[in-house]
């Protein structure tokens, strides 16, 4: 194990920040799952619960930012502590956006439940499952400080992009067939887009983990497995 | 361009080894900070760079210290000349119980400068270079001991600069000063690096981060890591460096 900080108070402040981030991550992951459940099961009550949970995510974002700011001001962190705290401030934005996007899925699902189902949601569920796994792996990589695992998350963003494009094309076809399909088709296309955006945020998160662990900034670099990873 | 370099520099106090064989290059017109816990050898290392350890009882120095690629420990080198080229400022400001003017002119007089006008010009220059001139120009003939701690420290810096050294060694130059006086010293260091090579020992890691271009981390007589200060403070390579600067020691 890595040694702990001589200053126990500092150590526990860092631990609190980390736990709070993980808790927030777990909560937004749950929101994705429930938002998709509300869609598939056409359950408005579940959708409303997702929408209500967003306020808590927003609150956590503000709290985490405050904690990070205080640590920066009072502790003058360096090296991996500094990378962790500055990253926390970025990660929290991604998590908050994932919360928003999950809320958007729940909103569209409430609208969709008012009309007959346009088509089975098999591909959307596949997309959602892929996105959720990306988020969970990114969070796990964060916990275990596993840069290789984080980089693998980034690689999977491409799969989600391809799924999204397929879904979008199929929906386009349905909408061209009949104007009656357009409203539902649009809503479903939005949901697919929200999921694709969540995957982008999970990608940001995984890039942050690589920076946190290795101090290597892989943003805006080609998504191919690095041979220099340590 | 390296102004100062050590090659297998080793220091022993009797049986005890204080600095293990160390190779370190200190680039010209840059600030190099030496950090590490108490007893890590950083001050001992610093004192080798102008042969101050010659004056320490029981200290034995081996290896080379190259100043412009010439070994200052070579028997043909005059330590007095070395110390004029490599000046030093200490932790406790130590002005002589003389006037401000005489403090700054001290090294010049020893060096044989006599003409009043020449001395005055150089005193003014040195006090300006140490960012003290505006504060003391009307009281040059008052005792240096009447100044505040921060001002006394800058008198000492002016005294060191007056003889026009090429390198300035600083051993905890701000550790006894309040934050404002510290900020002035740090700003001064920043300005000095335009013309001088500075090597500074500090316990204050934020100070090392603020003032230096390069940082060397010593631990138990070992040079553990040396690199650009931005690298050392954001992403050090060595676990021991990481542990020290994040406060995970002891």
Image (spheres, rainbow, N blue to C red):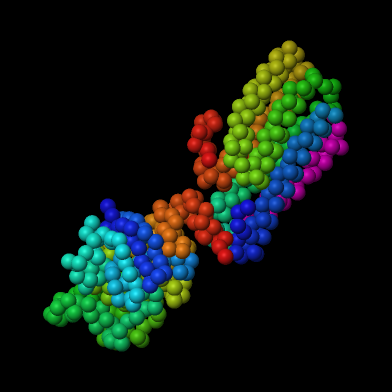
Q: Which of the pair B205/A228 is nearer the observer?
A: A228
Residue B22: tell me if it is visible.
yes
Please tell me how many numbered marks the rendered image carries: 0
Q: Residue furthest left?
A: B115
Q: Quadrant of residue A119?
A: top right
Q: Name the residue at 33% across, 77% down.
A: B57
When the figure is inspected, residue A57 is found, relative to residue B160, above or below; the finding is: above
Taking the image as shown, residue A199 lies to the left or right of residue B193, namely right
Q: Write the start and end of the magenta stretch as one range.
A: A42-68
Magenta span: helix, strand or loop, mainly?
A: helix
Residue B28: tell me if it is visible.
no
* Residue A78 x, y percent position in the rendering: 52, 56
Q: Name the residue at 67% across, 23% down.
A: A163
When the figure is inspected, residue B244 is found, relative to residue A100, above or below; the finding is: below
Q: Name the residue at 25% across, 71% down.
A: B83
* Residue B224 x, y percent position in the rendering: 44, 56
Q: Name the residue at 61% across, 42% down.
A: A146
* Residue B160 x, y percent position in the rendering: 28, 73
């Amino acid at each position: 194990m890595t040694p702990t900080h001589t200053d126990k108070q500092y150590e526990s402040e860092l631990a609190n920040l980390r736990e709070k981030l993980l808790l927030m991550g777990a909560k937004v992951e749950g929101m994705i799952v429930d938002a998709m459940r509300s869609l598939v099961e056409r359950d408005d009550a579940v959708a409303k619960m997702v929408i209500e949970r967003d306020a808590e995510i927003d609150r956590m974002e503000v709290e985490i930012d405050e904690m990070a700011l205080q640590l920066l001001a009072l502790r003058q962190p360096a090296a991996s502590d500094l990378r962790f705290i500055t990253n926390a401030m970025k990660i929290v934005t991604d998590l908050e956006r994932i919360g928003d996007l999950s809320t958007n899925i729940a909103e569209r699902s409430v609208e969709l439940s008012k009309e007959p189902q346009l088509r089975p949601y098999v591909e959307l569920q596949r997309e959602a499952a892929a996105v959720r796994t990306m988020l969970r792996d990114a969070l796990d990589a964060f916990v275990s400080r596993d840069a290789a695992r984080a980089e693998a998350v980034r690689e999977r963003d491409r799969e989600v992009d391809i799924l999204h494009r397929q879904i979008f094309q199929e929906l386009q076809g349905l909408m061209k067939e009949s104007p009656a399909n357009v409203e539902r088709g649009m809503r479903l296309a939005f949901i697919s887009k929200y999921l694709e955006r969540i995957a982008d945020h999970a990608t940001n998160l995984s890039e942050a983990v690589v920076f946190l662990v290795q101090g290597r900034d892989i943003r805006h670099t080609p998504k191919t497995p690095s041979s220099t990873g340590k | 361009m390296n102004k100062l370099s050590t090659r297998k520099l080793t220091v022993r106090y009797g049986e005890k080894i204080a600095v293990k064989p160390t190779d370190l290059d200190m680039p010209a017109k840059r600030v190099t900070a030496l950090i590490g816990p108490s007893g890590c050898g950083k001050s001992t290392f610093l004192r080798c760079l102008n042969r101050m350890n010659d004056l320490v009882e029981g200290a034995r120095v081996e290896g080379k210290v190259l100043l412009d690629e010439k070994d200052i420990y070579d028997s043909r080198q005059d330590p007095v000349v070395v110390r004029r080229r490599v000046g030093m400022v200490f932790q406790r400001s130590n002005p002589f119980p003389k006037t401000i003017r005489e403090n700054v002119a001290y090294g010049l007089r020893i060096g044989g400068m006599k003409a009043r006008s020449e001395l005055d010009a150089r005193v003014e220059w040195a006090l300006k270079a140490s960012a003290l001139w505006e504060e003391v120009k009307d009281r040059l003939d008052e005792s240096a001991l009447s100044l505040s701690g921060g001002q006394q420290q800058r008198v000492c810096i002016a005294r060191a600069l007056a003889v026009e050294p090429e390198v300035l060694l600083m051993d905890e130059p701000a550790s006894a000063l309040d934050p404002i006086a510290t900020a002035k010293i740090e700003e001064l260091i920043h300005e000095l690096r335009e013309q001088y090579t500075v090597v500074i020992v500090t316990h204050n890691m934020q100070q090392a981060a603020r003032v230096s271009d390069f940082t060397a981390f010593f631990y138990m007589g070992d040079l553990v890591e040396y690199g650009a200060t931005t690298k050392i403070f954001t992403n050090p390579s060595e676990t021991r460096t990481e542990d020290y600067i994040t406060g995970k020691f002891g």
